[in-house]
Amino acid sequence: MLQDVESNRPVELDALVHSVIEISRQLNVATPNIDALFGLARLQARVRGLY
């Protein structure tokens, strides 16, 4: 993802990170760190127009 951001290409957050969050919710497993990192990465990508 860093290479995508540096090359100004859209990032694949949903495929790489959000899928983990969806699976963890189905299994009732808390993932607070992944949730926080996903939110921050999505915010950065939106600010740069890459999400």
Image: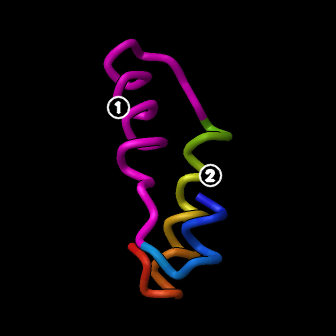
Above or below for 4 versus 30: below
Instruction: Give SS at disc 2.
Output: helix
Above or below for 19 versus 3: above
Q: Is residue 20 left or right of residue 3?
A: left
Does the magenta run of residues contain 30?
yes
Could you tell me the amino acid type at mark 1?
A: Glu
Instruction: Give SS at disc 1.
Output: helix
Query: What percent of the width, then of the height, locates residue 34?
Result: 61, 40
Which of marks 2 and 1 precedes in the sequence? 1
Mark 2 Cα-neighbour bin, 10 Å: few <14, some 14–19, many ≥20: few
* Magenta residues, start to end: 10-31
Q: How many marks?
A: 2
* Marks 1 & 2, CB-CB < 8 Å contact: no
Could you tell me the amino acid type at mark 2?
A: Ala
Residue with the mark numbered 1: 22
Q: Which mark is residue 36?
A: 2
Query: What percent of the width, then of the height, locates residue 23?
Result: 37, 23
Q: Quadrant of residue 7?
A: bottom right
Query: What percent of the width, then of the height, locates residue 31?
Result: 58, 31
Assign the C terminus to one quadrant of the image. Answer: bottom left
Does the magenta run of residues contain 12?
yes
> Magenta residues: mostly which secondary structure?
helix
Query: Residue at 46% of width from left, 42% of height from top?
Result: 16
Query: Residue at 38% of width from left, 12% of height from top?
Result: 27
Query: What percent of the width, then of the height, locates residue 49?
Result: 43, 86
Query: Residue at 55% of width from left, 45% of height from top?
Result: 35
